[in-house]
């Protein structure tokens, strides 16, 4: 049967208008009939070729979910991307492909120790990097703590809460669903008896837990060991050991929950204890190009009170970030100034007045939140812009309330000369005044 169909297909390819069989000739002037016969012959040939060839090995990685490390996706959070499957080849398979068996897929190189332990991607916020070590040696104590933490957190977690927690944090790694109070209880119970002989072993244990974390709460446990665990003393206040560890954790974490906890607590305590050592490091961070180090430098004095605050230093740390359009830096500036305004309102008002044009609307609003809010230059004692003389404030133009106030102030003299109400009267009264 196969030979007869192959002969039919050859005859059709040579002379498609005539179908020859022994004893008679059948003209095929009907296109659908000719196409149907040729299609049947082609399918039969393909099936015979496929049955003769061995089954090809599946392409590697078709069912692997990869975490994206594209910085463009950081704005939307950390998301998982499914590796696209290779497109299926069209047309008739080549003889070489059908006769040659598929080559075996080469084994992937051995993973690092952190990846073998289920290491999480570095930088779980808007930008996700491959698993990488913080540069510290492996710690057997840290590995043992991680296993105990993993067991305790999985029992204490709430799966229904875990989904919402991961979505809120925009995390590429899952969560156990442990609330903050529950997590702290677990951390304290697991780490109550741990001790370290020196600062290097303490830092290595923190890094081992951090690198081997498979859930977000496990990384919170690493931060707890770095600052709050009984075994962290006195090493957490040793600037020679703690400051490089904080820098590595900030750069690796690269998301607000990790960075703000490190900067506003651990880094702030270190600054209070060793201001002469930490001060130059903060100034280097503020002038660098690493976003989260710049934010950490600005937030490093959030918990400082009274004489602990270095106000001239904070101003120097804020100045390089004022021109940035990044939300995280603008918010940090406003947050830091708002905290200072609780004790030194006059200094904050003077700073905002001096740099009114350079500060963003978000930074000004946060800085003056407890001082009556940002209601324009006049409330700060600054001169209002003169129409046709002073350039408009580009930041005010982006603030609807400030823009309306400036336009009303500029149009008031002309309205008074024309005998109309002042444009500052807004809402229903203003609409009625102009006949709307």
Image: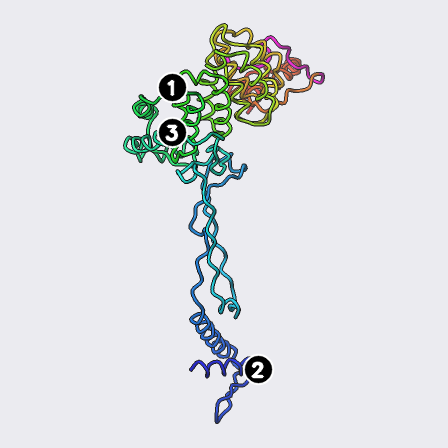
Is any part of residue 194 visible from this angle? yes
Cβ atoms at labels 3 and 1 below 8 Å apart: no
Circle 2 or circle 1, nearest the eye: 1
Q: Which residue is mark 3?
A: 142
Which quarter shows the C terminus?
Answer: top right
Q: Earlier in the sequence, mark 2 or mark 1?
A: 2
**SS of the residue at dot 2?**
helix
- Residue at mark 3 to residue at mark 2: CA–CA distance: 77 Å
Cβ atoms at labels 3 and 2 below 8 Å apart: no
- Residue 338, percent from left and from top: 50, 14
Left or right, 252 with respect to 166, comes to right
Q: Earlier in the sequence, mark 3 or mark 2?
A: 2
Q: Callout 1: few (<14), some (14-19), or many (20+) C-alpha neighbours within 10 Å?
A: some
- Residue 238, percent from left and from top: 47, 16
- Residue at mark 3 to residue at mark 1: CA–CA distance: 15 Å
Q: Is residue 373 magenta?
A: yes
Is any part of residue 403 visible from this angle? no
Q: Which residue is mark 1?
A: 228
63 is higher (above) or lower (below) than 96:
above
Q: Residue furthest bottom?
A: 23
Left or right, 412 with respect to 70, comes to right
Q: Which residue is mark 2?
A: 14
- Magenta stretch in the rendered image: 372-389
- Residue 20, percent from left and from top: 51, 88
Q: Earlier in the sequence, mark 3 or mark 1?
A: 3
**SS of the residue at dot 3?**
helix
Left or right, 268 with respect to 390, comes to left
């Amino acid at each position: 049967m196969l030979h007869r169909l192959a002969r039919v297909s050859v005859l059709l390819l040579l002379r498609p208008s005539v179908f020859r069989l022994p004893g008679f000739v059948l003209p095929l002037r009907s296109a659908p009939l000719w196409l149907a016969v040729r299609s049947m012959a082609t399918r039969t040939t393909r099936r015979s070729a496929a049955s003769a060839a061995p089954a090809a090995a599946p392409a590697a990685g078709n069912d692997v979910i990869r975490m994206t490390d594209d910085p463009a996706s950081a704005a939307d959070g950390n998301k998982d991307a499914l590796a696209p499957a290779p497109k299926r080849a069209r047309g008739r398979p080549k003889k070489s492909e059908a006769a040659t068996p598929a080559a075996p897929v080469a084994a992937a190189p051995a993973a690092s120790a952190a990846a073998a332990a289920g290491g999480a991607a570095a930088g779980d916020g808007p930008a996700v990097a491959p698993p990488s070590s913080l540069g510290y040696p492996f710690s057997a104590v840290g590995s043992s703590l991680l296993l105990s933490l993993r067991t305790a957190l999985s029992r204490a977690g709430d799966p229904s809460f875990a989904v919402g927690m991961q979505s809120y944090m925009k995390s590429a790694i899952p969560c156990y669903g442990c609330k903050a109070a529950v997590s702290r209880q677990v951390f304290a119970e697991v780490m109550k008896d741990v001790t370290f002989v020196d600062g290097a072993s303490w830092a290595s244990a923190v890094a081992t837990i951090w690198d081997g974390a498979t859930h977000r709460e496990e990384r919170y446990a690493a931060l707890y060991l770095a600052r709050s665990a009984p075994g962290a003393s006195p090493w957490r206040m040793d600037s020679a050991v703690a400051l490089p560890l904080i820098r590595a954790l900030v750069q690796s974490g690269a998301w607000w929950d990790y960075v703000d906890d490190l900067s506003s607590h651990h880094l702030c305590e270190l600054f209070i204890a060793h201001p002469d050592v930490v001060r130059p490091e903060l100034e280097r961070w503020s002038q660098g190009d690493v976003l989260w180090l710049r934010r950490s430098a600005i937030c490093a004095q959030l918990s400082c009170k009274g004489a602990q605050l270095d106000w001239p230093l904070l101003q120097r740390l804020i100045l390089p970030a004022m021109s940035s359009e990044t939300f995280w830096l603008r918010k940090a500036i406003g947050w830091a100034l708002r905290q200072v305004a609780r004790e030194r309102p006059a200094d904050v008002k003077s700073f905002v007045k001096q740099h009114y044009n350079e500060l963003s609307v978000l930074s000004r609003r946060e800085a003056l939140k407890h001082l009556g809010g940002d209601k324009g230059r006049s409330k700060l004692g600054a001169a209002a812009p003169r129409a046709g003389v002073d350039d408009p404030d580009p930041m005010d133009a982006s603030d609807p309330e400030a823009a309306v106030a400036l336009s009303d102030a500029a149009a008031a003299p002309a309205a008074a000369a024309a005998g109309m109400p002042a444009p500052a009267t807004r809402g229903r009264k203003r609409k009625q005044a102009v006949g709307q």
